[in-house]
Image (tube, rainbow, N blue to C red):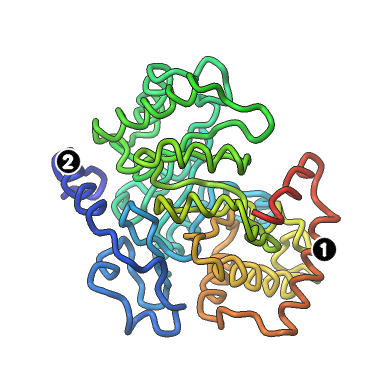
């Protein structure tokens, strides 16, 4: 098979096989024993590396790395500034390092992200699962709230990016507060159905910051919702009752956790690789990922990694003991309190994601 293209017949065959391969396990043991415990099915995943942990993306049957690559690149100027590599070189190198270490999913949720990651994967598209959302052509904008408008925009985006298909089309919905109407939800579901049947999206879902709405849509349309993207931070915890995770577990939905570091407010430094807080911030990032993966309902956090060093730091987190000890818990809890107190402008809403 050509590395850049997957024939429609092979695509539909593989999608059907993945959907059928639903096992009982949600996650593998952490990577210390992954090489010994990985099944033949897991070893066949894209860019498999025995030192990486892989977790099952719900009923898709796909096995994705326990940390994946988020599309954003906040503070990238700290590594591409004066004397640094170009932006495009940086993104190519980060993708390359991800593939080397076994990180096998990238989530692109706006036009520039889709274009730069599809370019970075040219010639090696089949080595990484690709999540797609061209958010300015999706239901946040009123004119894209019908099945036809969504599908027309999806086709336009695929063509512009040179993509024959995506592994997950996860449409970006309203953030919070302003709920979509029943007709708008029907438009979404119709588009997801048609895209999957046409072989343009292997699996489908959505992104939202509204927990009750997420639960309602999953319960109402479980067949079309394979995976979601939604916040889950270094200080998030599951509600004891009426949690969003009730619907997630019932319908076997995969979750990519966005904002794991609360838009960098978890950290003391500014992401400069030689800054005075760099080592401490690396440690906090690893602790946060370990905490997040302690909830097996989360498939993977998807931090926006801006350097190959940050990629390697996430691999180090996978290799560390999953459960935090008493000292580490106290450190992360203290960092979490500072995190909530130091949210950037416009991110106060993220406090609603302390309990999910």
The residue at 74%/74% (across/down) is 280
99 in relation to 171, above or below: below
Give left or right: position of 29 versus 143.
left
Which residue is outermost to the front? 241
How far across and how far down the image is residue 67, in percent? 50, 63
SS at badge 1 = helix
Task: Kindly check if marks 1 and 2 are in contact, taking CB atoms under 8 A apart as contact.
Answer: no
Q: Nearer the viewer, residue 118 or 241?
A: 241
Give left or right: position of 6 versus 85.
left
How far across and how far down the image is residue 167, in percent? 34, 45
53 in relation to 259, above or below: below
Q: Which residue is mark 2?
A: 7
Q: Quadrant of residue 314?
A: bottom right
Number of marks in the rendered image: 2
How far across and how far down the image is residue 238, in percent? 63, 60
SS at badge 2 = loop
Crowding at dot 2, Cα within 10 Å, few <14 / some 14-19 / many 20+, comes out as: few
Q: Nearer the viewer, residue 146 or 117?
A: 146
Crowding at dot 1, Cα within 10 Å, few <14 / some 14-19 / many 20+, comes out as: few
Q: Quadrant of residue 235?
A: bottom right
How far across and how far down the image is residue 334, in percent? 81, 70
235 in relation to 317, above or below: above
The residue at 42%/48% (across/down) is 120
Q: Is residue 90 visible?
A: no
Q: Which residue is mark 1?
A: 337
Q: Is residue 84 visible?
A: yes
Earlier along the polypeptide chain: callout 1 or callout 2? Answer: 2
């Amino acid at each position: 098979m050509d590395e850049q293209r997957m024939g429609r017949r092979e695509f539909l065959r593989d999608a059907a096989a993945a959907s059928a391969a639903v096992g009982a396990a949600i996650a593998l043991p952490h990577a210390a024993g992954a090489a010994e415990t990985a099944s033949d099915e897991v070893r066949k995943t894209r860019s498999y590396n025995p030192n990486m942990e892989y977790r099952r993306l719900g009923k898709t049957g796909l096995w994705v790395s326990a940390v994946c690559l988020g599309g954003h690149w906040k503070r990238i100027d700290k590594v591409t500034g004066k004397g640094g590599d170009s932006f495009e070189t940086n993104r190519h190198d980060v993708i390359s390092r991800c593939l080397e270490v076994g990180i096998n999913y990238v989530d692109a949720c706006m036009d520039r992200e889709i274009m730069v990651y599809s370019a970075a994967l040219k010639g090696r598209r089949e080595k990484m699962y690709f999540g797609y959302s061209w958010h300015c052509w999706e239901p946040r904008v009123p004119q894209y709230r019908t099945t036809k408008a969504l599908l027309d925009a999806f086709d336009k985006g695929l063509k512009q990016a040179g993509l024959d298909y995506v592994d997950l089309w996860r449409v970006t919905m309203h953030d919070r507060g302003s709920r979509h109407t029943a007709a708008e939800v029907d438009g979404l579901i119709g588009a997801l159905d048609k895209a999957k049947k046409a072989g343009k999206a292997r699996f489908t879902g959505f992104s939202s910051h509204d927990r009750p709405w997420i639960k309602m849509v999953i319960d109402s349309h479980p067949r079309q919702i394979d995976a979601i993207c939604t916040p889950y931070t270094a200080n998030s915890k599951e509600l004891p009752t009426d949690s969003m995770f009730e619907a997630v577990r019932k319908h076997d939905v995969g979750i990519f956790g966005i904002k794991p570091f609360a838009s960098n407010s978890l950290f003391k430094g500014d992401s400069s690789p030689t800054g005075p807080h760099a080592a401490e911030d690396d440690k906090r990032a690893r602790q946060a990922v370990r905490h997040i993966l302690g909830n097996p309902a989360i498939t993977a956090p998807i931090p926006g990694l801006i350097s190959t060093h940050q990629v390697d730091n996430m691999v180090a987190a996978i290799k560390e003991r999953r459960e935090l000890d008493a000292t580490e818990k106290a450190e992360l809890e203290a960092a979490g309190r500072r995190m909530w107190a130091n949210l950037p402008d416009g991110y106060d809403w993220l406090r609603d994601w302390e309990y999910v």
